[in-house]
Image (cartoon, rainbow, N blue to C red):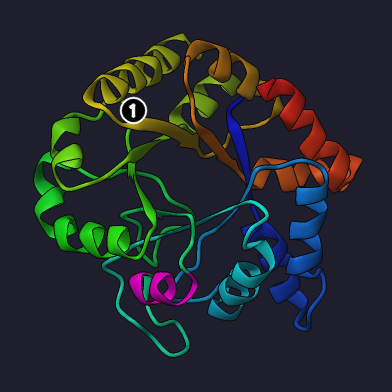
Amino acid sequence: MTLLSVNLNKIAVLRNSRGGDEPDMSRAAITCIEAGCGGITVHPRPDMRHVRPDDVRTLAALLRGRVEYNIEGNPFAPARGAYPGLIALAREVRPTQVTLVPDSDGQITSDHGFDLANDTDQLRPLVAELRDLGCRVSLFVDPGAQGFEHAIAIGVERVEIYTGPYAQAFEEGDAGEQLALCVDTARRAQQAGLAVNAGHDLSQANLGTFRVAIPGLAEVSIGHALIGEALYEGLSTTVRKYLQILR
């Protein structure tokens, strides 16, 4: 079955909006795990507008030996204040997977992937270090991405397809073209020897169609929609509904 990794960034956003420790990140993670999810995702950023470095460390201790831990981020963003940088955090906590994303401070959320033909030379030493730490490395890529052989050559094991355009098209009632693009991208990545993850704006409404269309989908990382839906039905119930879709 495709692994569900729950992204807890929005829990941190709600906590940070008021200060203090509520809602509690650890309690949210435990609730998701007890409901059956196979992983937890966080995406710390240098401006620390949601998940903070101490959250990353606390969750690492909590999750070890229980579920997969996926940390996303821009490996080129420099250390700033309490943020030590993505690679430094990976050295500390040794997550199961590090998903490299070419985002910047100015982005509300990740909205594009790497150019594999042009970015892999810069990524090569970082991928090597992460692999030496025992981390699986995934690269965030656009639907229609080319050059998967470059990712394989530097030791990347997975790619995560950016599903934002598919989700938008689905909401507008005509997802056929975007879905076909994702399917073709997944097929070419798998043929090159990469496992395929997916994420961004996936929801209960659009996940089933996407999952059926892509055989062998390894993992989906879902946060924004899942946490929003959980406001109405509860976190445990919502996680279980996603798992039922993935089955």
Q: Nearer the viewer, residue 128 or 220?
A: 128
Location of residue 237 in the rendering, given as x and y in whole percent from the top left corner: 87, 38
- On-image quarter of the N terminus: top right
Q: Is residue 17 above or below residue 232?
A: below
- 170 in magenta: no
In magenta, the rendered stretch is 87-93
Is disc 1 placed on a helix, strand or loop?
Answer: loop
* Residue 107 in which image quadrant: bottom left
Q: Nearer the viewer, residue 98 or 228?
A: 98
Tell me what residue is drawn at x 76 percent, y 50 percent. Answer: 33
Location of residue 116 in the rendering, given as x and y in whole percent from the top left corner: 17, 41
Location of residue 243 in the rendering, given as x and y in whole percent from the top left corner: 73, 30
- On-image quarter of the C terminus: top right
**Residue 50 seen in the current view:** no
* Residue 127 in which image quadrant: bottom left
Q: Is residue 82 above or below residue 27?
A: below
Tell me what residue is drawn at x 30 percent, y 78 percent. Answer: 78
Q: Amino acid at mark 1?
A: Pro
Furthest residue to the bottom? 81
Q: Label 1: which residue?
A: 143
Q: Nearer the viewer, residue 160 or 90?
A: 90
Q: Is residue 126 above or below residue 58?
A: above
Tell me what residue is drawn at x 28 percent, y 26 percent. Answer: 189
Tell me what residue is drawn at x 52 percent, y 28 percent. Answer: 168
In the displayed structure image, the side of residue 64 where residue 35 appears, left or right = right
Location of residue 115 in the rendering, given as x and y in whole percent from the top left corner: 19, 42
Q: Nearer the viewer, residue 56 or 209?
A: 56
Most frequent secondary structure within the magenta stretch: helix
Furthest residue to the front? 65
**Residue 130 seen in the current view:** yes
